[in-house]
Amino acid sequence: MENLRDKYEVVIGLEVHAQLKTKSKIFASDGCEFGHDPNSETSPVTLGMPGVLPVLNKEAVNMGILTGLALNCEIPERCKFDRKQYFYPDLPKGYQISQYDEPICVNGYLNVKGKRIGITRAHLEEDAGKLVHAGSDGIAGSSYSLVDLNRAGTPLLEIVSEPDMRSSEEARNYMEELRNIVRYIGVCDGNLEEGSMRCDANISIMPKGSTKFGTRAEIKNVNSFSALQRAIEYEIDRQIEIVEEGGEVIQETRLWDDNTRETKSMRGKEDAHDYRYFPEPDLMPLRISREWVQEIKDKMPELPQAKRERYMGLGLSEYDASIIVEQMGLALFFDKVLELGASPKIAVNFIMGEIAAYLKEKKLEITETKLTPENLTELISLIEKNTISNNIGKQIIFDMLKDGTSASKIVEEKGLSQISDEGAIKEIAQKVVEAHPNEASAYKNGKVQLLGFFVGQVMKETKGRANPKSVNEVLKEILG
């Protein structure tokens, strides 16, 4: 299949649904938090009762505008809502209030690892409910499904990319950057596992050199970045196999099964006319003034790309900057440490070293530990003042992560302050050299790499407390 892939170019576009972090639903006052008892977060509006009317949630509009600005979109002065007609058991009204030909955001783009990926539109809409099928969620039986309408009416922003991606890796990078952005601007928590961010992938193939896109298939039910890549890779191979055998790819919606690692046909893919869109008669078109847009733009927080570039300007590598930015809690922690005046170089060494190892081992976020930015800053200050050595710092950081004790208190209680007195270091170094005459002789005869051995022995004798710079100088003097 690898050889066959050389004959084709892959075309990928993503439709990403981001659940907006409003306190109430987009057209009703009931809440939309995840995890409540089934059907406990509903109202007559959510349930589509006769005679009820939707009222637009202004905060959802604010979040839509903010996201559009973060994605370099144009915000039209007018947008409107439409009814999207389709029947499904978890859609109480028999239609979804969405946006069709006049969305809130248009013509954007996202720069991802040097490649510009166009964003066609981003539009506001309400979510449907959730079907719980027999045999799932602990339900016994095999012939029925239950409906939970807690999610119905939850505000969504659907972000539709241009078909600009040419590999599963590019699609994953785009999705990860998009999640970073919506999390940093505070409009969505980006939790794929809980469904607050969902992705549908449109995939087609065409012969290399062609300008005519092939027939696309839409892949649904993708709930992780790795699953997105696996689903795309499988679908590419499936479509190539069909074409190579003389068949035609049909336009359809397929489900990704991460257990069997394959896509399965769900239904024929609908086009816009199948939904019989028409303007929502119960909601007036929305006028968005330029003053409104500017007011939201003025509150825009620092975006991930700008944060990465700022970190690299402080001397961080591109890799380190990217890793920190990807974990928003870690980035906010690092920013606070920088605000407190700590050395960026020493701080990032701890964050990418001992702290990262501890978080990985314990499966924790930095916010779930006892370490505070103030404590880490104090630790770095003790190292810079030569009160303790860097090695001692690496030892005590784990206690600070576990119980939140300050660095100075640990140093005082355990007697870990650095030995900088040259006389004391010289006395210990002299004993070490006398205890290893063969190595001392070899050093004097040109085996200068043995200096590291003697430094290690002195540090061992002092339990890591000796000032390494002083140790090196004293040993060179003694060894001649």
Image: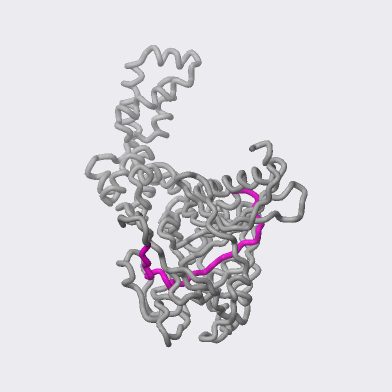
Q: Check residue 383 for magenta coloring.
A: no
Figure quadrant of the N terminus: top right
Instruction: Give percent across and percent down for residue 397.
Output: 33, 44
Q: Check residue 166 for magenta coloring.
A: yes
User: Can see residue 338?
Assistant: no
- Residue pictured at 48% horizontal, 75% vertical: 94
Residue situated in front as seen by the camera: 119 or 446: 119
User: Can see residue 165?
Assistant: yes
Asked whether, in this view, residue 202 is left or right of residue 90, the answer is right
- Residue pictured at 48% horizontal, 21% vertical: 449
Residue situated in front as seen by the camera: 438 or 434: 438
Instruction: Give percent across and percent down for residue 316.
Output: 52, 48
- Residue 462, above or below 111: above
Instruction: Give percent across and percent down for residue 59.
Output: 46, 77
Residue furthest front as drawn: 143
- Residue pictured at 64% horizontal, 55% vertical: 250
Asked whether, in this view, residue 186 is left or right of residue 233, the answer is left
The way the protein has been coloured in the rendering is one colour
Image label count: 0
Residue situated in front as seen by the camera: 168 or 152: 152
- Residue 269, above or below 469: below
Residue situated in front as seen by the camera: 106 or 398: 106
Q: Which residues are magenta?
A: 145-168
- Residue pictured at 36% horizontal, 68% vertical: 33
Res 244 quadrant in image: top right
Res 130 quadrant in image: bottom left
Instruction: Give percent across and percent down for residue 336.
Output: 41, 59
Figure quadrant of the C terminus: top left
